[in-house]
Image: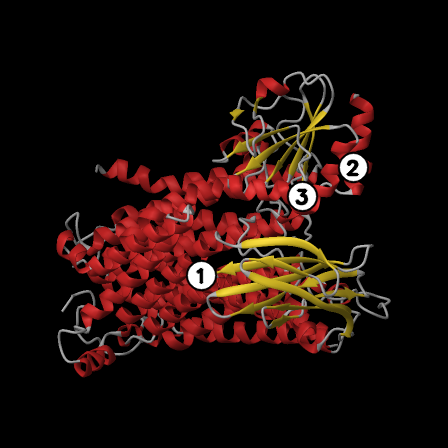
């Protein structure tokens, strides 16, 4: 009964979403107050309908209702409650429903917190969101129904894929999807602005918090996913240039560019058409990522089995959304004229530079990801593009970003002098040079460059903050007081840069990782990375829905317990890595196998700086959230005229 | 910029999206007609000779060029590996076994540090008759190497007949390599 109600709610949601789309977009031109204010109400009811449908599916998962095909195929009564819940979105149909839920949540957020927007703009933004949502809900309802029944029901479900039975899975997809889908709001703002034919500083100020919020979630989602693959897959890697990882990275790159150039629209009313294009591109890339993962076109570890007819349906949706918005862009954007002018050396130019390089990286990653299927189509050849290509192309493009992001925040708007900015950065430059010289002596040039770059970014951002609070030039107490009154946007931006620098440090440090595969008998030891690793014992241990063999390893006084888990329902063995971190290095051990001759085959790794990769991602996201709490961005707050960029 | 050129410029994203959408449509149609399987991972080198390259030796051994494997007189393997790659370690005993059985294996160390490589060979044995270093990875790109380890089977006329991405296991040797050896010897 409850799944039928969920299915019915889904059907209602489709109708409400399309109503929201049509009324939202065309309502404002009717000059009727009822039409103008209908969209927010429709958005709320549309969210309520999807929310009910989603809860119905979660309910079916929680009570293990195996008459629902989705639950029978991807859940089981034997797994812990949290994975019965998270398993609902760990599969194709359920994940699309989660996607729609978050999209409708975005619409609700605009309806509730968009009170400061002009009513016509809010209505049109909601209209665009409604149309997109309606399209994907229709997809769910027609070709990817999560409530499809199965009769007779099996006694037990097939179970949750063991690799996905991890707290990381419970949080990674919702956070990542919120990031992906959140850019729909920036997209809707861009389309609404094109429809209205007006973009000004106010538009920039309205769109930025939404873009920033989704960027924070996307950053956190990517970091979570990378961390999850690091500790569950047991390969000791954190990024594999897998097409699905690239699909998340692409909107992150263009979204980061969008954040930066929306500042220029807000402050200087320049780069308008470009900002609109980035907003369209970011959401289009999010959508395409969803599509490519599900169509089966790309080779990936994130396989969702999907039929090509679903692929065609999604392609048609994408064609309408992306094609329609770019058509509108081609027609309307040429009339958007920039009013602000700026010199080649200025904050604006630094932000343009940031955009050029971020988009260049995005173009390279995009090409690398899509080249294999396109080469097959055009030239009939099968090939694959792997990490070597990305390492050789992305790293050289990252270097100028790292250099520029140190100076950028210190430049003034309109016209600036590079020399004084560089003089203020002497400390960062000297530190980076020192790090490079010390480390290049050990012949790890790439690691030395990376660590120097990371140090440069972190210290430059700290310098920026220190300059703003006049550290050491006024008494310390005054500096602290200045820090408290500093615009949160400025602190958030510095924090975002620091986080990026910290991630760069972590990634560079990982190139110095050492690893070893050994077979040890209990009592034997081996040396790696300056530590003595001793296998103490191998024993059995109980688990909720698996049995496990645990190896006890001591590493200079620490004890690690990597295990091999045998999931009886699926006949799958997973390796649960044991990681000990001190914040600056990970000691990482995987119990890979028990060879016939007895003992344990262990994969031992020492990963210097590895925690910084995710720690940096977290700092970036926190910087974003801090910036979001800036008075300037709080919708409805009166703006205090205070130039953010000016260096006091 | 003239208004017309501005219009054309702003139409570029749309043109790109239309081209991309058309291509995806074609790909999906071909998937439906089962003419295209994106999950197959065949090498572009199958049925061809490896692209031109000339790599220096590594680990104190002689390097080689594409001309050296143009006509090997007996089927052979070219094995891409690296000391930093964990599956390569797992593969080492299998390579040693194959080398002991008389199969010629030539190695290419991919983006490797000479010292780490020497240590790797000292620890895991050296199954290679020749060993070259692709220090900057460009030859790997030309070969279409997906990742290390990766093994290419070259017949006695120098044509690549098979590529396997991943560590060679008993299964792979029994189901793929042994039939190839029987066929091309």
Label 2 marks a residue whose chain is B
Q: Nearer the viewer, residue A317 or B96?
A: B96
- Find disc 2 in the rendering and name its residue: B173
Locate residue B98 relative to residue A176 in the image: left or right.
right
- Find disc 3 in the rendering and name its residue: B124
Label 3 marks a residue whose chain is B
Is label 2 in a helix, a strand or a loop? helix
- For mark 1, does the 10 Å Cα neighbourhood hold few (<14), some (14 to 19), or many (20 or more) residues? many
- Find disc 1 in the rendering and name its residue: A184
Locate residue A524 relative to residue A208 in the image: left or right.
right
For the N terminus of chain A, the image quarter is bottom right
Q: Nearer the viewer, residue B93 or A491?
A: B93
Is label 3 in a helix, a strand or a loop? helix
- For mark 3, does the 10 Å Cα neighbourhood hold few (<14), some (14 to 19), or many (20 or more) residues? some
- For mark 2, does the 10 Å Cα neighbourhood hold few (<14), some (14 to 19), or many (20 or more) residues? some
| 2 vs 3, front mark | 3
Q: Position of residue A375 (x, y in %)?
A: 55, 32
Is label 1 in a helix, a strand or a loop? helix
Q: Position of residue A116 (x, y in %)?
A: 31, 75
| 3 vs 1, front mark | 3
Q: Nearer the viewer, residue A475 or A394?
A: A475
Locate residue A396 relative to residue A561 in the image: left or right.
left
Q: Marks 1 and 2, how far apart in space?
A: 50 Å
Rendered position, A191 above or below A67? above
| 1 vs 2, front mark | 2
- Are tags 1 and 2 found on a single chain? no
Rendered position, B24 above or below A93? above
Label 1 marks a residue whose chain is A
Q: Check residue A212 in the rendering and tell me which mark sits there, or answer none.
A: none
Q: Residue at x 77, y 33 (%)?
A: B100
């Amino acid at each position: 009964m409850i799944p039928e109600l969920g299915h019915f709610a889904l059907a209602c949601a489709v109708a409400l979403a399309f109503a929201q789309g049509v009324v939202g977009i065309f309502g404002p031109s009717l000059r009727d107050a009822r039409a103008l204010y209908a969209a927010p109400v429709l958005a709320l009811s549309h969210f309520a309908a999807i929310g009910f449908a989603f809860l119905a599916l979660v309910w079916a998962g929680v009570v293990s209702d195996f008459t629902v095909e989705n639950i029978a195929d991807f859940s089981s009564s034997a797994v812990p409650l949290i994975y019965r819940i998270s398993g609902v979105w760990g599969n194709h149909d359920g994940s699309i429903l989660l996607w729609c839920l978050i999209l409708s949540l975005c619409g609700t957020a605009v309806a509730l917190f968009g009170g400061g927007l002009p009513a016509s703009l809010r209505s049109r933004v909601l209209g665009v969101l409604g149309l997109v949502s309606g399209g994907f809900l229709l997809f769910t309802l027609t070709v990817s129904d999560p409530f499809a029944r199965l009769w007779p029901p099996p006694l037990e479900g097939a179970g949750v894929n063991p690799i996905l039975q991890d707290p990381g899975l419970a949080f990674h997809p919702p956070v990542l999807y919120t990031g992906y889908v959140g850019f729909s709001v920036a997209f809707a703002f861009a389309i609404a602005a094109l429809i209205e034919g007006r973009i000004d500083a106010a538009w920039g100020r309205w769109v930025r918090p939404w873009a920033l919020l989704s960027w924070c979630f996307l950053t956190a989602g990517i970091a979570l996913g990378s961390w999850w693959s690091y500790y569950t897959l047991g390969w000791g890697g954190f990024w594999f240039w897998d097409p699905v990882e690239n699909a998340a990275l692409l909107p992150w790159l263009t979204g980061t560019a969008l954040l930066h150039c929306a500042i220029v629209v807000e402050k200087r009313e320049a780069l308008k058409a470009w900002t609109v294009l980035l907003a369209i591109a970011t959401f289009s890339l999010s959508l395409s990522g969803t599509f490519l993962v599900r169509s089966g076109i790309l080779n990936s570890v994130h396989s969702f089995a999907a039929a090509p007819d679903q692929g065609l349906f999604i392609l048609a949706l994408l064609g309408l959304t992306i094609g329609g918005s770019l058509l509108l862009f081609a027609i309307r954007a040429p009339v958007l004229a920039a009013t602000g002018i700026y010199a080649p050396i200025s904050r604006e130019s630094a932000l343009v530079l940031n955009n050029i390089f971020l988009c260049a990286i995005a173009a390279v990653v995009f090409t690398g990801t899509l080249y294999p299927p396109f080469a097959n189509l055009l030239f009939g050849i099968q090939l694959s593009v792997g990490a070597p290509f990305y390492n050789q192309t992305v790293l050289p493009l990252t270097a100028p970003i790292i250099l520029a992001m140190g100076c950028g925040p210190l430049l003034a708007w309109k016209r600036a002098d590079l020399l004084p900015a560089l003089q203020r950065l002497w400390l960062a430059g000297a530190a980076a040079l020192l790090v490079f010289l010390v480390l290049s002596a050990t012949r790890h040039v790439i690691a030395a460059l990376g660590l120097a770059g990371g140090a440069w970014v972190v210290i430059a951002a700290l310098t920026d903050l220190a300059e703003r609070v006049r550290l050491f030039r006024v008494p310390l107490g005054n500096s602290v007081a200045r820090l408290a009154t500093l615009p949160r946007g400025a602190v958030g931006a510095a924090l975002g840069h620091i986080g990026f620098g910290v991630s760069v440090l972590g990634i560079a440090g990982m190139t110095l990782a050492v690893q070893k595969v050994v077979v040890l008998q209990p009592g034997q030891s081996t040396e790696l990375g300056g530590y003595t690793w001793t296998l103490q014992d191998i024993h059995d241990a109980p688990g909720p829905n698996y049995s496990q063999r645990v190896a006890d390893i001591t590493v200079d006084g620490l004890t690690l317990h990597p295990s091999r888990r045998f999931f009886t329902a699926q006949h799958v063995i997973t390796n649960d890595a044991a990681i000990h971190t001190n914040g600056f290095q990970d000691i990482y051990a995987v119990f890979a196998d028990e060879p016939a001759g007895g003992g344990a085959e262990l994969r031992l790794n020492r990963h210097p700086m590895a925690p910084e990769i995710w720690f940096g991602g977290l700092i970036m996201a926190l910087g974003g959230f801090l910036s979001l709490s800036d008075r300037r961005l709080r919708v409805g707050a009166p703006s205090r005229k205070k130039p953010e960029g000016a260096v006091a | 910029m003239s208004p017309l050129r501005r219009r054309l410029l702003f139409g570029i994203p749309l043109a790109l999206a239309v081209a991309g959408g058309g291509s995806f449509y074609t790909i999906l149609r071909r998937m439906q007609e089962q003419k295209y399987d994106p999950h197959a991972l065949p090498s572009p080198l199958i049925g061809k000779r490896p692209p031109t390259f000339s790599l220096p030796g590594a680990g104190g051994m002689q390097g080689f060029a594409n001309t050296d494997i143009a006509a090997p007189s007996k089927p052979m393997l070219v094995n891409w590996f690296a000391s930093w790659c964990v599956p390569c370690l797992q593969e080492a005993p299998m390579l040693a076994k194959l080398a002991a059985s008389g199969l010629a294996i030539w190695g290419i160390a991919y983006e490797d540090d000479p010292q780490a490589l020497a240590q790797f060979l000292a620890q895991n044995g050296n199954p290679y008759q020749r060993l070259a270093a692709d220090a900057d990875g460009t030859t790997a790109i030309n070969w279409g190497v997906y990742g290390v380890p990766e093994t290419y089977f070259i017949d006695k006329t120098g044509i690549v007949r098979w590529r396997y991405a991943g560590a060679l296991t008993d299964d792979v040797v029994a189901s793929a390599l042994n039939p190839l050896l029987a066929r091309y010897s």
